[in-house]
Structures are given as structure tokens and as C-alpha cells.
Amino acid sequence: MKYKDYYETLGVPRTATQDDIKKAYRKLARKYHPDVSKATDAEARFKEINEANEVLKDPEKRTAYDQMGSNWKAGQEFQPPPNWDAGFEFRGGQGGAGPFGAGGSFGGGAGFDASDFFESLFGRRAAGGGARQRADVSGQDHHAKVLIAVEDAYRGAERTISLRAPVEGADGRIAMQERTLDVHVPRGIRPGQHLRLAGQGGPGSGGAKAGDLYLEIEFQPHPRFRVEGADVYVDLPLAPWEAALGATVDVPTPDGTVQLTIPAGSQAGRKLRLKGRGLPGKNPGDLYAVLQVVLPKADSDAARVAYENQARAFPGFDPRAHLQG
Amino acid sequence: MNRTISSALRGSVVEEEVELTVVELGRVCRATEQQIEVWVAEGVLQPSGDTREVWRFGGDSLARMRLATRLMQDLEINSAGVALALDLLDRIAELESRLRR
């Protein structure tokens, strides 16, 4: 297990006041909140910031953490000294919800995803893990994300997903249980949409019904296709003569190749619409081929002559005419 | 660790096939009816129906409500601030999608 320097995480000195810590935390939380930030490691950073704040905002936890000394370096191998926490009473916090996120929040509040380091110091319960069900309570609705390929949305797909959830055993202990579900992803699903699987959430107790499972569908980035709502965009490179004279070319779509007629005189950036070839469904989207003109290299005598002939053939052509005056 | 396997499940697409009552929305988002009322008052959620008892929320309210709840809890912003943040996030998403096309 590696030592975590919570002060370094929040960017404050060990002498920081509670007020400084709060300010630093708020600022970083806004910066790295996964709903707001575009940073690729936003979620991981946000978790670390929350964990650091969870310890440093609480004077008792902070004192205990400080007691281990300031000679540790972040990332150093670490084992808590025996009885290091004698005299502190922070174990056994209130139960929150499990790994699906209490109230769907990423951190703070009623439970967060604590590191091994945190748990070795303050215990699992301090992180709000391990909810206890009361009698006759409907099961909670659970949430999870599923990644699919663009092609899956065109054809429909089956996905096997693994879910981990805390389950209370007969002896009252909370154990993580993994279950796998085979899920049919319907044709025409769009990015960001949710699938509701009735009765697949948390179990109810005392005969009450189970909660539902909500799966948020996300699309894997595709090297060729960009999905915007129901529409799909694909860049279509053309030779200059195809763009100028018109041509019929093959265009890849997630559903297979189609032929597209390029009108004569097509400029780069022009979008040609293939109606109804976007994501399928009641209101199918469109597929847009975004034209690009690619110049062949002038790396042979014949190629250079061809370009020189073009220059002679268009004596009045000035691509920068609109920049004048 | 235990493993149980069930056969392929078919769900409903929330955004297209599902309307939620205030009770259902509260359960999905783990929010109270009072919190939902606040989001309706701020214009973050726009249900059909005049009174709370007959409110019906479109399936897209689910993602919006969950986002609003996360921002409020994680960043300690008040409801008006969250409503503003959501409007700005919508605008950013719209501009970014225009850039990607």
C-alpha cells in the first residue's frame, strides 16, 4: 500500500487552517468534477481530492493523520503503525450507499469510493460503505454504465455486464457480490440514453419489491464515425478531380459500404447527407459525409507537370480574392 | 465472491419509452419530492401536468436530475447555481457538438 499525502493532493501546507483547506477543496472540486471537467483523469483526481478532504476537513481525522508524522512521501510503501489510532473514535460511521454512489454523487456527502490507504486508517465504514436495509423497504435503484460500439446501435447487440454490489449475509456482514447479466441493447439506442431493467436493482427486504437497474449507454470512440445525437458523421477524402468533376465513390457507414454521388464542383467541408442512414429508430438519424480534398504529392516530374498545367489552365484563379480590401 | 448468471434481459429505453411520476423519479435519483419541486421551480425539470400529483416527467429528466443532484452534493452549490451550471453545460455541449461535426 502506498502512502497518500493528502496535503499535497489539496495543494496546501501542513499548517493550513480549516478555512484554507475548505477553499482549496472547493476550487479543486469545481475544476475536476467529472460532470464539468474535460480532463481525462478527472474522475480519479476528483476521488483523490474528496478522500483528502474527507480526512483534512475533520479535525479529529486530521490530527490522527498528522500523528503519523510528516516524513512520509506520497507513493512510499506504507503500513499503519500498530495502535496508531488509539484514542480516536472515528470508526463506524453512518452507512451510506454502496459502489453505485449514494444519490448518484461522485464524492463527498454520503459515502465515497475510498482507497485502501484510507480504509486501512479509518475503516470501511468511515467511507460510508455497507448500507443496512431496514425491514419492508423496496430495493434501491442501481445505476451502471455500458460501453457499446456504434455498430451495435445499428444492429442491436447482446452484452454481458458484471456488477458488484454489497450484500448483507445471514451473519450481518457485508460482502461484495458479483453477478453477471446478459443484456439486450436495442437497435437505435443513442449515446447517453438509459435502459431500465425492472427488478434488477437492489433486493427489497421483507417481501418488498426489488429496485430497478438503470444502464447508461455510452459509445466507444470510433476511429471513423462521430455520433451526434441520432446523426453520424464521417470524413470522406476526395481527389481534387473527383471534387471538381464529380464522381461516384464508396462511403463506409456503420451498416456497410454505400455508394455516394459527389456533385461536380464540391468544395472541401461540404456535407453530403445520406437521409435515414444515421442511427436507426422511430426517427432515424442521417449520415453526413464531410468532404475533404486531398492533394496528391508533387514528387515526380509527371506530377509537377500536371500541377504546372493546372496553373496555366486557371490564369485568373485567385483563392485569396475574398481576402483583398 | 458468488456468481449468478441470468439470461439476456430486455429493458425499456428510458428517454423514449418511459414517463416517470414524482415518486419514481425520486426513487431513481434518491431525492425527496421537495427537492424535485425545487428543480421544477428553477425550470431544471419541466413535467407535464399542473399539480404534483399528476406530474409526468419525460425520460430525459432522469439524467438531468441526477446531474443536478451530483453538482449540488459534490460542489455544494445552491439550486439557482446548479440551474445556471446546467444551462452553461448545455451550451458547451451544443458548441462542442458543432465543432465535432
Image (cartoon, coloured by chain):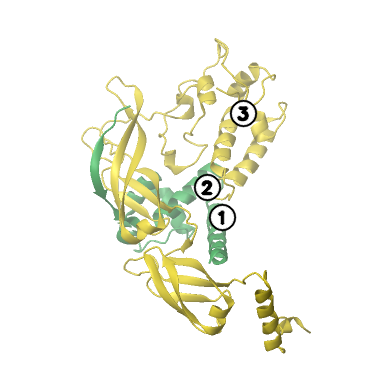
What residue is pinned by disc 1? B85
Q: Which residue is mark 2?
A: B71
User: Quarter-wise, where is residue B2 in the image?
Assistant: top left
- CA distance for labels 3 and 2: 21 Å
Q: Amino acid at mark 2?
A: Leu
Mark 2–mark 1 distance (CA, rounded to whole Å): 9 Å
Going by the numbered disc 1, the residue's amino acid type is Ala
* Residue that sits furthest to the left in the current view: A207
- Which chain is disc 3 placed on? A
Q: Of helix, strand and loop, which one carries label 2?
A: helix
Specify whether A33 is left or right of A311. Answer: left
Do labels 2 and 1 touch, CB within 8 Å?
yes
Q: Quadrant of the C terminus of chain A?
A: bottom right
Q: Nearer the viewer, residue A209 or A43?
A: A43
What tint does the image give chain B?
green
* Residue at 65% across, 34% down: A10
Identity of the residue furthest to the front in this view: A301
Vertical arrangement, residue A16 with respect to residue B29, above or below: above
Residue drawn at 66 percent across, 20 percent down: A72
